[in-house]
Amino acid sequence: MKLIKTIAEMQQFSKSALRHRQKIGVVPTMGYLHEGHMSLVDMAHKLADVVIVTVFVNPTQFGPNEDLAKYPRDFDHDWSLCEKRGVDAVFAPEPEEMYCPDRSVWVTEEKLSRGLCGQSRPVHFRGVTTVVAKLFNATLPDVAVFGQKDAQQAMVIKRMTRDLNFPVEIVVAPIVREADGLAMSSRNKYLSADERIRALAISAALREADAGIKTAGRKALCGLAESISAKIAAASGRVDYVEALDADNLEPASESTRCLLIAAAAYFGATRLIDNVIINLD
Amino acid sequence: MKLIKTIAEMQQFSKSALRHRQKIGVVPTMGYLHEGHMSLVDMAHKLADVVIVTVFVNPTQFGPNEDLAKYPRDFDHDWSLCEKRGVDAVFAPEPEEMYCPDRSVWVTEEKLSRGLCGQSRPVHFRGVTTVVAKLFNATLPDVAVFGQKDAQQAMVIKRMTRDLNFPVEIVVAPIVREADGLAMSSRNKYLSADERIRALAISAALREADAGIKTAGRKALCGLAESISAKIAAASGRVDYVEALDADNLEPASESTRCLLIAAAAYFGATRLIDNVIINLD
């Protein structure tokens, strides 16, 4: 497995693979890898000949009061997980390699990124779209795999890829959960034992919502977000948002909605967690 | 020579060239081609094995009161010029192919694009960077050739390419002029015979400034922009801007400036013309 630290070397690696007619799959991550990320690696192996994992804690997607400095890092563990899973190259640039001091270019998405996480994290998605554009140009993938846990991020990146015509297929892989239902996340590490238990309220409430709609159909939609919020609050979670949206455009769910996204974000202690479920209404 | 109308076909064409280890050069244009554009094609031939000319009048770089609707078009002439000059493919998509109705992604450059043309054309460079990013992803070039006549545009595109890590070398080719000095431009077609003669004031004033600095050195810089403006105004040109800037960063020229850009924009009748000269101060 190759460790690549510079963009020039990364592009060279990928161009050489392309010349050998190999299909390149990339899994962009911020490191501190877990089985959620590894499921994306497995998916990439199914779709491509060469699998690249990028490990980069991207400063531009953190707001000034967010957890950039204390975001968990463990490169040795990341490296060994990638090695075990047959990754071909890990691209792990330093921030100085990715961003020039006088940089002045942003990629922005102006519709899908406004609500949900974009509301409480106003600069977040501008950082995400910009760094993903850069990572696409560094790794030159045929396919890129993202996790459904970051549902809005996946939609924003799909839109960016479409609107800027990146020659990249975006694949979104299902959420991977702990045995008790908690969605896997690098940020779960922040949770105290007590918070960890209470945080299960999010996934439990989403699971109940899913079951409710599967039983009662669209009429279960009425008051659904409020009911999920109440369940999270009952576990002393501080709700950032719970929304039932059209999964195709992130507009509020309506009569014409065929695929529903219920997305939730809540704080347990100082830790902000997100989770979601997609439900077919047909 | 191949005519390509869709992004998918364009990408396929370029990927096939890359697999055959051919170097791809692209010349992005808005059509209505003249010898200025053809000099870019010649340059591309020197640097690449396969030369693509894109012909697309990009709506997003025109402001609401600008000349999008009446921008000159003559595809048959463009086609025959490209054919004579050994171009391999002309990429000429319709606006509907380039822009989805629900598009929501922009590429923006926030420093170099603010002054000069960015001041009087506030949405212009956002449209340019966005469409060039799209054209890069459609044509997948190794090298892209732009004209020095659009000096600010060339700098903004270089910055975008660097900051988003497009694997593309940006080459800027010198201004091509008519025999009497007028910088070649598709917009020259708008000029009446009288305007055409008076418009020579721009290139003449820039030429005199160049000569003045070559004779007197940096001290000729004092009052230079005002003097050029006065000469353009004396020919009944309405000056948009005349500025003497550091060619490396578009900051006002200073003691440390080693390479000077004198850039001018002025209206003759309803036609806005731009021109510039780069002068080495060492």
Image (cartoon, coloured by chain):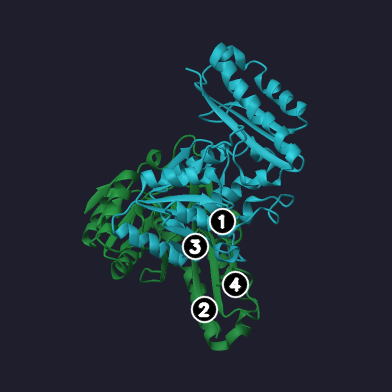
Chain colours: A green, B cyan
Q: What chain is tagged by disc 3?
A: A
Viewer-proximal residue among B208 and B151: B208
Q: Residue A107, how many percent across, how many down?
A: 53, 51
Is residue B197 left or right of B38 when viewed as pictured? right
Q: Residues within 10 Å of mark 4 (few under 14, many from 20)?
A: many
Among the two numbered marks 3 and 2 on one chain, the one whose residue lies closer to the N terminus: 3
Q: Residue A28, how many percent across, how many down?
A: 38, 56
Distance from Cα at disc 1 to Cα at disc 3? 57 Å
Distance from Cα at disc 2 to Cα at disc 1? 54 Å
Q: Residue A266, how many percent across, how many down?
A: 54, 61
In this rendering, the answer to whether B219 lies above or below A36 is above
Q: Residue A156, how many percent across, how many down?
A: 52, 61
**Amino acid identity at mark 2:** Ile
**Are callouts 3 and 4 both on one chain?**
yes
Q: Could you say whether the residue bearing mark 1 is in a helix, strand or loop?
A: helix
Residue at position x 45%, y 47% in the image? B41
Among the two numbered marks 3 and 4 on one chain, the one whose residue lies closer to the N terminus: 4
Viewer-proximal residue among A268 and B91: B91
Q: Could you say whether the residue bearing mark 3 is in a helix, strand or loop?
A: strand
Q: Can residue B164 be seen in this view?
A: no
Viewer-proximal residue among A46 and B231: B231
Q: Name the residue under label 2.
A: A279
Is residue A1 left or right of A163 when viewed as pictured? left
Distance from Cα at disc 3 to Cα at disc 4? 14 Å
In this rendering, the answer to whether A262 lies above or below A273 is below
Distance from Cα at disc 4 to Cα at disc 1? 54 Å
**Amino acid identity at mark 1:** His
